[in-house]
Amino acid sequence: MPHRNLLVSDHPTQNHSLLELRNIRKSFGTVVALDGVDFTLNPGEVVALLGDNGAGKSTLIKILSGVQKADSGTMRINGIAVDIRRHTVAKARKMGVETVHQGSALGEKQPLWRNVFIGRHITNRWGFIDVARERSETLDILHGRLGLRGVGIHADAEVKVLSGGERQGLAIGRAMHFQSDIVILDEPTTALSLKEVNKVLDFIGHIKAAGKSCVFISHNLRHAHMASDRFILLDRGKNIGEYRKDELNQDELMHALMDAASRRIEE
């Protein structure tokens, strides 16, 4: 199956893209991590960012989330130009970008409400944490947004009562609660059982249902194909293809990535 190169002209031209990255470059010494990468994300869309180890996926999402600075290129979030050399985690969050990392760190012995609001507590007029409100809003996330109503799941429960998939769900619910328009999921299904994977995929559906958008990073093509609307393929820091879900099935997606690996070996 022929791959589709991602020139700038190949990208959707609509003005309502939620996220637009153009010609992003990043090097670490003599190692080129990103070599002119383009990426777009539309409202209510899940886009899978795929590629082998060293393709540039992690570097790209770290730039988007403010963890690392790009050397050059442009970024627009909700139509607003971002200074990529001064972009920070705090600025990314303020612009509605949240990252749910693989095995998101949660306080095992802390109640769920503290985990939801850690670092961003609601305070009352005297400057103290408004525990009652945080408990109430945590219940809204657990029961209303995520549909978690199992025995023992309540605002004061400790994280250890949650399964792996439910923990990922809590992290996703936390990101959505803070009005994030863009949720980055970094390997959210790694090391989970089939049952727990299905829970995480359901939670991704909640993101779309809420009108949010998602960047999905995964080495599991089956999960990526099930969850995503569009796929952007990277190899050695460059765009090598972009496909809509209706353009190829899971096997064809795998072959597109294998073709890239074959071309790399031949070179």
Image (cartoon, rainbow, N blue to C red):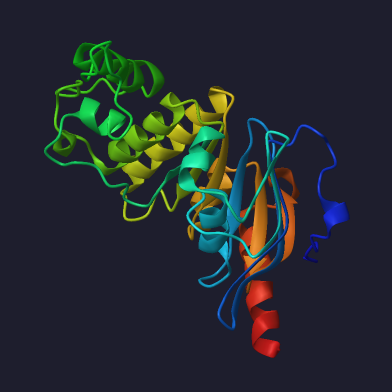
Examine the rendering and report whether any part of residue 255 can be seen.
Answer: no
Q: Who's the residue at 48% across and 35% down the image?
A: 204
Measuring from the top left, give residue 229's x and y in whole percent: 65, 41
Q: Nearer the viewer, residue 255 or 121?
A: 121
Examine the rendering and report whether any part of residue 208 can be seen.
Answer: yes
Q: Who's the residue at 51% across and 59% down the image?
A: 68
Measuring from the top left, give residue 15's x and y in whole percent: 82, 34
Q: Place residue 239 in its image quadrant.
A: bottom right
Measuring from the top left, give residue 142's x and y in whole percent: 31, 22
Please identify the residue farthest to the front as the structure is shown.
126
Seen in the image, is 167 located left or right of residue 76?
Answer: left
Q: Nearer the viewer, residue 151 or 194?
A: 151
Q: Who's the residue at 22% across and 23% down the image?
A: 150
Seen in the image, is 190 located left or right of residue 59?
Answer: left
Which of the image's four quarters has the N terminus? bottom right
Which of the image's four quarters has the C terminus? bottom right
Q: Place residue 209 in its image quadrant.
A: top right
As drawn, 132 above or below 192: above
